[in-house]
Image: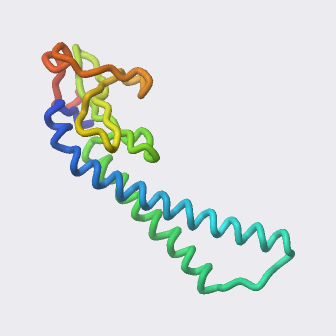
């Protein structure tokens, strides 16, 4: 069953979530770099009709591609297992499902923010973020989604 968080529970998760997000972002950057290097090499070979390549360098790029992909998947898996929804890896945007007035909504946090200050409806996204106020605090709850 999907996990639902209280504001307090989600707040306690932030150090873990931040650490894992930073690992995932780093792995994504390494993966993108290896992809770019290998693609560039392929383009040069195609345009020149073949070239002499440094096979050791190419193998290193392939290893970087593979290992960074595995690290990225592992990091995203840890967040998913914890019940955290990654919305935008580049900006470190995540959501924590919760219930508010009988409806599932999301506590919204972005890497670099000190605490969770916003929430939004399931279909509203980042643009629909609203500040958490006393009414929200008094009428939200965690637990398990039925």
Q: Is residue 15 above or below residue 1?
A: below
**Rendered location of residue 65, percent (x, y):** 53, 68
**Rendered-image quadrant of the C terminus:** top left
Residue sitting nearer the eye, 110 or 80? 110
Residue 71 is left or right of residue 42, and the answer is: left
How many numbered discs sit on the rendered protein?
Answer: 0
Residue sitting nearer the eye, 144 or 29? 29
What is the quadrant of residue 37 in the picture?
bottom right
Residue 32 is left or right of residue 44, and the answer is: left
Q: At 42% across and 38% down in the image, what residue appears?
A: 87
Q: Is residue 124 above or below residue 69?
A: above
Color encoding of the figure: rainbow
**Rendered location of residue 18, percent (x, y):** 29, 49
Q: At 57% across and 74% down in the image, what residue appears?
A: 61
**Rendered-image quadrant of the N terminus:** top left
What is the quadrant of residue 137 in the picture?
top left
**Rendered location of residue 121, percent (x, y):** 35, 21
**Rendered location of residue 53, percent (x, y):** 71, 83
Q: At 25% across and 33% down in the image, what residue appears?
A: 116
Residue sitting nearer the eye, 33 or 101? 33
Q: At 41% across and 21% down in the image, what residue appears?
A: 128
């Amino acid at each position: 069953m999907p996990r639902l968080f209280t504001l307090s529970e989600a707040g306690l998760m932030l150090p873990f979530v931040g650490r894992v997000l930073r690992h995932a972002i780093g792995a994504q950057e390494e993966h993108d770099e290896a992809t770019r290097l290998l693609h560039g090499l392929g383009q040069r070979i195609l345009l020149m009709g073949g070239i002499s390549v440094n096979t050791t360098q190419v193998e290193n790029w392939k290893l970087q591609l593979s290992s960074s992909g595995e690290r990225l998947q592992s990091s995203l898996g840890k967040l998913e297992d914890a019940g955290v929804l990654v919305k935008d890896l580049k900006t470190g945007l995540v959501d924590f499902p919760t219930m508010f007035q009988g409806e599932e909504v999301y506590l919204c946090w972005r890497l670099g923010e000190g605490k969770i200050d916003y929430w939004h409806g399931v279909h509203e996204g980042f643009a629909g973020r609203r500040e958490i106020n006393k009414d929200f605090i008094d009428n939200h709850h965690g637990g398990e989604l039925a």
